[in-house]
Amino acid sequence: MIFDVVTIFPEFFTSILEHGVLKRGRAGGQIEVRLHDLRDSTDDRHHTVDDRPFGGGPGMVFKPEPVFRAVEAIREEAAGEPLRVVLLTPQGRLLTQAVAEELAREKRLVLIAARYEGVDERVAEHLATEELSIGDYVLPGGELAAAVVMEAVTRLVPGVLGNEESRAQDSFAGAEGGSQGAARGILDCPHYTRPAEFRDWKVPEVLLSGNHEDVRRWRRRQAIEKTWRQRPDLLANTHLSQEDAKILEEIQQAAHEPKL
Ligand code: ADE
């Protein structure tokens, strides 16, 4: 999978490309990241990428010409391959695990990271195939958002993690019904490692029992309970199996019983 990142700060990505999943994916040849300095697509002496907004107001706006030029050069090089062009912006649709799974099926993704107050709307209308937001907050630029997209997508590209099962059990896994995770569209269960006792805090007994079925049920219950407490909105949007619905009912009942 090729990521083409259009940015005025290519050096921003130096460190993340050398760590973790992006480093692995690049070393293993599953992914390639191409950084495109937007200033290389300008044609004036000062390499101007931004200008004042029509109608007035604070801040600067990315000019359309360099962005179009940069993406059209990538398009030409991709020679007719289908290309998704993603504009990172708080105005986009929200990045969820389901969206990451969808993007991970692509061969090539262009990510446009803007700075300042935004990008000339003609980029969103006539160049980008979609707008994507990584959350309902405003960052000073799209670079971190592009990095988030690359990390979330790359770990789903087959062969990068080497442990396909661990992804199936992620929080939100199977959000689209794609993976058959232990937890479909809900949060992950808690995890523990050695020591079995740390500062008087013991690891739940069941995890040391060696009884796989008990462990499975405990994890399931924990995942459902955590989701119900922290993110009830996720439960409303997911289809629970009969077993899970029963577990949820028990959790809710227990929560309403007075503690002795
Ligand atoms: N650029 C600025 N804020 C952003 C956000 N929340 N998501 C994606 N790109 C952004």
Image: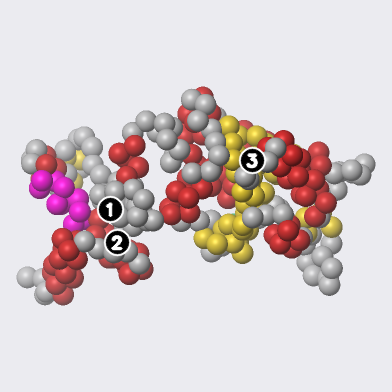
Q: Are marks 1 and 2 in contact (CB under 8 Å)?
A: yes
Q: Earlier in the sequence, mark 2 or mark 3?
A: 3
* Label ID, residue 227: 2
Quarter of the picture holding the N terminus: top right
Residue 116 position by quadrant: bottom right
- Looking at the rendered image, the disc whose residue lies closer to the viewer, 3 or 1, is 3
- Kind of residue sitting beneath label 3: Glu
Region rendered in magenta: 213-222
**Display coloring:** secondary structure
Q: Distance between the residues labelled 1 and 2?
A: 10 Å
Left or right of 36? Residue 229 is left
Left or right of 198? Residue 80 is right
Can residue 81 be spotted in the picture?
Answer: yes
Q: Which of marks 1 and 2 is nearer the N terminus?
A: 1
Q: Are marks 2 and 3 in contact (CB under 8 Å)?
A: no
Residue at 59 percent of width and 40 percent of height: 108
Q: Earlier in the sequence, mark 3 or mark 1?
A: 3
Quarter of the picture holding the C terminus: bottom left
* Label ID, residue 122: none
Residue at 15 percent of width and 66 percent of height: 246
Q: Is mark 2 on a helix, strand or loop?
A: helix
